[in-house]
Image (cartoon, rainbow, N blue to C red):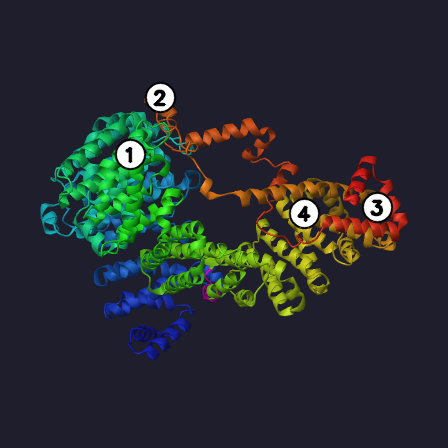
Amino acid sequence: MDHNTILQCFAATLDQNFTIRSDAETHLKQFSSNQGFLQICLDIISSNEVDDSIKMAASLYFKNKIATSWNSKSSYASATNTIAINKDEKLLIRDLLIQTMLKCSKNSPRCIKVLKYALSEIILNDYPEKSWESLLPQSFELLSNSNNDIDTINIALICISEVFRTYRWKYNDARQDLEVLIMEYFPSLLTFANDVLFNNGTNMNNQQIGDLTKLVIKTYKFVSYYDLPFVLQRQEFFIPWANFFVTIIQQDLPIEFLNSTANDPSSRSRNPWVKCKKWAMGNIYRLFSRYAVNSITKKFEYNDFKTVFLNEFSPQFLQLLFQQIEKWGNANYWLSDESLYYSLSFFEQCISMNSTWKLISSHYLNILQHIIFPLLTPNEDTLETFENDPQEYIHRNLELWDDDYSPDLAAISFIVTAVHKRSKRTLEPTLDFIIQALQSNMSNGNDITLNNAVQIESSLRMFSSIIDKLTQQDSPYLNHLDGFLKKFVIPFFNSNFAILRTRVCEICSKLNPIDIKDPENRVIIFNGIVSCFNESKDDSLPVNLSAALALQVFIDDNQFKQVVSEYVIPMMERLLQLSNDFETDAISGVMQEFVEQFAEQLQPFGVELMNNLVQQFLKLAIELNEAANFDPNTIINVKDMPDEGDKQMAAIGILSTAISILLSFENSPDIVKNLEQSFYPAAEFILKNNMEDFYRELNEFIENSTFLLRSINPIIWKILELIGDNNKNENSMIPFYLEDFMLSLNNIIIYGKEELCKNEFYTKIIIEIYEKAIQAEENTLDDMKNIFQLSQMMILALGDHLPSIFKEKFLTDVMKAIIEEKEDGLKKHIVFAVTSYNVITASLCSSSPTLTLQFLKQHNCLELFLQLWFTNFIPNYTRVYDIKLSLIAVLNICCNMTTNAFHTLGLESLLDQIGKVVVQLIAKLPIAIKELNDKKREFSNFDANKWDDSNGVFDKAFNDDDEIDENADDDEVNGDEEADDVRKLMDMLEKDNGDDYQFVHSGTFNEADSFDDLEEDPLTESILHNIDAFSLFKESFANLEQNDVTRYQTLMHSLSEEEIQILRHTLSL
């Protein structure tokens, strides 16, 4: 391996010929495991004689090699058996990397961006381990000796920022060494930033220096984002840094820059100095919102810092923000979206505390008029997006999916916080402003201009954001809702502007039909929603979607249902089309509601609907699968990684709708079978491509279809084969998602047990799932619960058909888990304990309980098992399943074991106890069955259409808990919206639960209380469902009395008169 060979390989990776490229990549992979390879890469990158494209290829390879091999303990290195880089080579690479970056700064600056990620990975691993402590002093020395060379300064500041980045996600207690570093280095860093970089604003035209300044600002962000170092809380440190940020924020951008980018806002936002303003604002906002406001968690009690920030800094800073905002509102000043976002967010935080609310309350109307209203008014870009990219408009303006610093979303958040926390001072002025704006723009009736329309949109968007407050119980505005809707909302159902039709439907989606009292309004709204939903103009997608969401709200209303019932089929087809055109789970929710409300009308089209849904799902799933299989080696920036969250949610929504369609055919088994066939392609794609995000919905579909049919069809056995094939893959996630797969496996075992007894192929699949799950590393008790639930079901379903080797393995595994937990652990983790004990109990239900008891004795666990089973578990059982399972097992021991077996096992005295246990179980069973049946009736009687909150039971009273007492001190005012709710919950727990409250303080449950965690689903059947325990009991005791009088008398003599009466009563049933 030599320099030229490696160089030629990198050059060949850029060749257009696939074979040449492939051979080069293969050779590089071989060379990369040799010591010295990385040094050669750096030599190539730093050479002035190598082409830039080859340098970039070498840089990417170097970065990826560092990412996968530098940390030998990483999950990737462990999973791939990657050869780690040895310690001596690491020392050499670290020094060479800095030198290479310094050289590349001059001749190959593009490589710096890639090498920076490699540097970051090395620092992240080595600096916290104190393996590269010399880097920080070396970097500051490089800074001091830079002679103002921009490239040298850049490398020095990159190293400095990456070192301090390693402290970002730590609390102060875990980074005490940081305090010393800040005291030693931050004063000189700030001086350098002020004097050399900012230099009284003289460098504002130099974008490179802007990038350097941004590195300094982000360095401060790294150390203050998660916790605020004690040194930086001190006034002598905080004020100079805060002044530096303020200096950046208030510095005007060069006029020539503003003129040259007047028609290119995105170019402006990319300017490094604009980004400096953004991060400076971000740092100040973070200091305020995290460390200077009151919080229910009381995590950061930095009172001295809070006093300095609130009393000495925030009043002056607010004045600066007001000045800039005022000039922006008058179109005399340009502010980036990020600056507007942080300004409004800062104002919003001020609302929550009385001391800061006093500073902005007098400005509220001005903020509303000159900031909020213009920001919510659609500009040309918004209107163009609405027309040409409706999906993006919906994401941004209706679903509010936006990770950017969007000032309009900050404006909405400001209004919402103001009218909820300061409603007495803000709600009426806000509503008055909205009404005045609407009146002024509707003065010409239907003859409104585009300028009127966008201002109406702004006003209605403001109204939409506060409608929940206006319609609260006892709201003085609630009785005026009909009048407002009639005058200012309903007319725009027929607007020529689609953006207004969209907003009207969006407002309707937030209404409660009960609140609309005017019959005429109701009819107009009903027809308007249906009309908007059905329109098919070019710009109608946002209108259709918002109307669909309104449909979902009103669909429970009987009068509205009558309007819709005539159009159910075409409207469902339209929903399917919308779902295909637009990737959102919202449409799926509407379709689910339609299926549930109009199941009868939609039944003839069930299979067709299912086919359409499966095709739509497959379209999304294929795109998601392709995105998931991208090549990470092509990624330079983490932001370049594909984000398919909306597709995923849409796909999940489609599967949920498919399940709803399935459930609507519970009385049509033939159609259910056809629906299973239609769903199969979706199941096949999910399992063959390991799409774990959809495992839950896949198994819910199988669970429901098999439950409706009470049988397992060939298509479900075929899906089980796919599950088995997937499970055999080395990287299968089925063991990790076993809880989800238990939904389907449970029913396959219950309704397919006859086939499982006959067909070892299917039995083997389920046992292999068990074996892989039990072997998984780091199984939690919840995981073990699912595993043991599977094994006990196999024991009960297969009985003597289960090969003894597997039964012994099930028992060995469960005994190992029980022994590891010991008695105290079992009492603390009741759900796990009962589930694991049920594996043994299930084994005792077989034709040879003696073998199971012998197994326990051989493992020295017989006494522990019987003691806990009889004295701790059985007395506390409340589930039908647990009681019935124990009763069957106890009867099997009592009636089917030989006297010699009792003697051999040393259990002669057990007969004196076992009678009382039988009585206890037989007495519990009717109560448990009644409770389970009551639950079933509750579910079957529940009718969503009858869910009525007409009395506003669940509404909060107007102006109650949200409103802040303006006469209270800030310490009495909580900035956290859920504070009161949390406090009330804690009070309730202490008052109503007595000793139970100990769990809130991390105490342990009492044993009986813990059994409440054992839930019994009234909507599913258990493997024991068809066993009549009472008949079994009577039959067993009759046989015992006839065939073994001595044992029968022993049992009866051990009982009290009351217990005998219970037995006789049961026997007489």
- Sooner in the amino-acid sequence: mark 1 or mark 3: 1
Drawn side of residue 847 relative to residue 284, left or right = right
Q: From the image, which quarter does the C terminus lie in?
A: top right
Q: Marks 1 and 2, how far apart in space?
A: 37 Å
- Mark 4 or mark 2: name the one nearer the start of the chain: 4
Q: Which residue is identified by label 3?
A: 911
Q: Which amino acid does label 2 sit on?
A: Ala
Mark 2 vs mark 3: which is more N-terminal? 3
Judging from the image, what secondary structure is the residue with disc 3 in?
helix
- The residue where tag 4 is placed is 882
Q: In this view, does 737 lie above or below 829?
A: below
Q: What stretch is highlighted in magenta?
A: 681-691
Measuring from the top left, give residue 405's x and y in whole percent: 27, 45
Residue 689: within the magenta?
A: yes
Q: Position of residue 225 (x, y in %)?
A: 35, 41
Whether residue 429 is visible = yes
